[in-house]
Amino acid sequence: MARFETPRRHRRDDVAQTALRILDDHGLPELTMRRLAAALDVQPSALYWHFENKQTLIADLADRIVATADARPAAQPDHSKEGSRPGPDVWRDVVRGEAHALRDALLAYRDGAEVVSSTYALGLGSGRALERLRASVALGGFDEPTAERAATALLHFILGHVSHEQQRMQYDAFGVVAPSAALEPRGAKSSRRSGEQATGFAFGVDLLVSGLGSLASSSFRETSEPAAR
């Protein structure tokens, strides 16, 4: 009597984890529903039980990538001691910490910045990255509209910078970048290359944070002057 194998059942998490592996191994352009189905040994139609379409799958991956930044404890002020209050500049360190944690999370996956950026542009996903940045900026006492705009500017910078980093790394690996602009000239060490990228990123974040600090100081002076007269 012939035996028929029962198709293997997969959970939503199984599908997403396999998709992340394909993304990391082959890049976003090669992450197709057909390739994913083959890796799971199922028909492509079986994937739609878990994800409505490819866009919702990518949005789930974006949330998972951003969530790895959550694993790094943010430099939140400690209110455990009675009478403890955060210093006026604590928000600056918190914002920097969130920005660097998000950069690390994006760099941990091939095309990570593109995955998160496309999801953000489509209005999909949880919006966790923007929420964390907004909450960090709000620690500086900024009003909601200002915190929202500042967080958006920070997120745009982070996504743009890391996207450029990842594109250049791939093009450099393929040997298609002009020698004068290559990230890895002869004799250069990988650690030095990555260090330069990290330094450039930190400089950009510091510019944005300093600008916010100047805005805060200006607002404080404007509100204080009438009272002093």
Image (cartoon, rainbow, N blue to C red):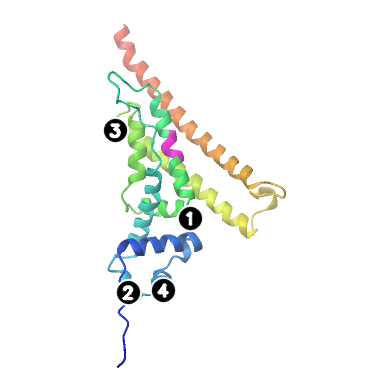
Q: Are marks 2 and 3 in contact (CB under 8 Å)?
A: no
Establish if 58 lies above or below 44.
above
| Residue at the disc numbered 3 | 144
In what element is the residue under mark 3? helix
Give amino acid for label 4.
Ala
Image quadrant of residue 46? bottom left
In what element is the residue under mark 4? helix
Binning the other alpha carbons within 10 Å of mark 4 as few (below 14), some (14 to 19) or many (20 upward) gives few
Give the mark nearest the N terminus, 1 or 4: 4
In percent of width and height, residue 5 lies at 32, 82
Binning the other alpha carbons within 10 Å of mark 3 as few (below 14), some (14 to 19) or many (20 upward) gives few
Instruction: Please state which of the two labelled residues, at mark 1 or mark 2, is closer to the viewer.
Output: 2
Binning the other alpha carbons within 10 Å of mark 1 as few (below 14), some (14 to 19) or many (20 upward) gives many
In percent of width and height, residue 37 lies at 38, 72
Give the mark nearest the N terminus, 3 or 4: 4
Instruction: Give me the C-alpha separation between circle 2 and circle 3.
Output: 49 Å
- The disc placed on residue 111 is 1
Identified at 32% across, 7% down, the residue is 228
Instruction: Give me the C-alpha separation between circle 1 and circle 3.
Output: 32 Å
Instruction: Please state which of the two labelled residues, at mark 2 or mark 3, is closer to the viewer.
Output: 2
Identified at 29% across, 26% down, the residue is 80
* Residue range of the region highlighted in magenta in the rendering: 96-100
Give amino acid for label 3.
Glu
Identified at 42% across, 68% down, the residue is 32
Instruction: Give me the C-alpha separation between circle 1 and circle 4.
Output: 21 Å
Instruction: Give me the C-alpha separation between circle 1 and circle 2.
Output: 30 Å
| Residue at the disc numbered 4 | 38
